[in-house]
Amino acid sequence: MITLTGNSLTIKEVERVLYGYEEICLDEASLEKVDASRQVVEKIVAEEQLVYGITTGFGKFSDVLVRSEYVEELQLNLIHSHACGVGEKFPEMVSRAMLLLRANTLLKGFSGVRRELIQMLVSLLNARIHPVIPQQGSLGASGDLIPLAHLALALLGEGEVAYRGKICPAIEALNAEGLKPITLQAKEGLALINGTQAMTAMGVLAYLEAERLAYQAEFIASISIEGLQGITDAFDEEVQLARGYQEQVEVARRIRKILEDSQLTTHAGELRVQDAYS
């Protein structure tokens, strides 16, 4: 179980959640910050203060006051209007990463959402309910508005999700897990989509996959050394420390570990003085 605080999530924890399906819980102290932030939003609505995206429209309509009885409809319309992506769907792992990263960001307590919304994101993640999200349509610079709108639909029981190996309506998956769709309140639609979790999710996954490939390359290199009865002296720790690059030192250490019981490698002067370059 990994506890999200909004400030301490590591790349290794992301890997455990994405590939190991480790479950998430929320830090209570962070949730109290979320509650305090929410009270500010509710005060703005109650007093009908003029604040963008809470009591006003969006974009060109930022100077149009939205009365308190319409603030929920405003947020729902925002999600519906932006859930217009096209093209191939993101892999489930991207959707899964987006759920995790958006929950982590909102948990910082600066976005004015209710704790129930963050808990719903985590519930989807733990239940392995992954929103179906089209790849094309995002702006990125002002937020991954369209991909995150498709993610938000699942919280409302709308749109489609990947669940138990198939694509189904979101409401079916929620019902199967005993989850009730949420109703967006003031600012929550804006808070859900005004982020960059689509590009961040893809970046994190690219990093993790590149790291895995790098480790696999070490095994391939080790097998190649055995196949050529190669000289392993170049991987000695003293040689690596002389170069001074910590990552190189670590790679050499792992290759030595892989080859430590090999009967096929050699040392300088046993079969040859130096290995061929190619």
Image (spheres, rainbow, N blue to C red):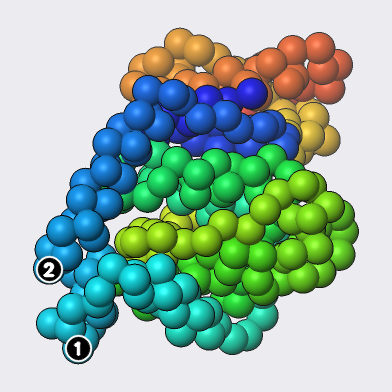
Up-down: is 200 above or below 242? below
Q: Amino acid at mark 2?
A: Leu
Q: Quadrant of residue 270?
A: top right
Residue placed under numbered mark 2 in the picture: 50
Give 174 or 1, whichever is nearer the viewer: 174
**SS label for mark 1:** helix
User: Mark 1 or 2, which is nearer the eye?
Assistant: 2
Q: Residue at x 74, y 44 (%)?
A: 127
Residue 148 screen position, x and y as percent: 49, 66
- Pinpoint residue 13: horizontal percent, then vertical percent: 55, 31
The residue pinned by badge 1 equals: 60
- Residue 92 horizontal/vertical position (percent): 70, 59
Name the kind of residue labelled 1 in the image: Lys
Specify whether residue 274 is in view.
Answer: yes
Mark 1 Cα within 10 Å, few/some/many (few <14, many 20+)?
few
**Residue 202 position (above or below residue 21):** below
Q: Residue at x 41, y 46 (%)?
A: 114
Q: Residue at x 64, y 43 (%)?
A: 123
- Left or right, 115 with respect to 255, comes to left
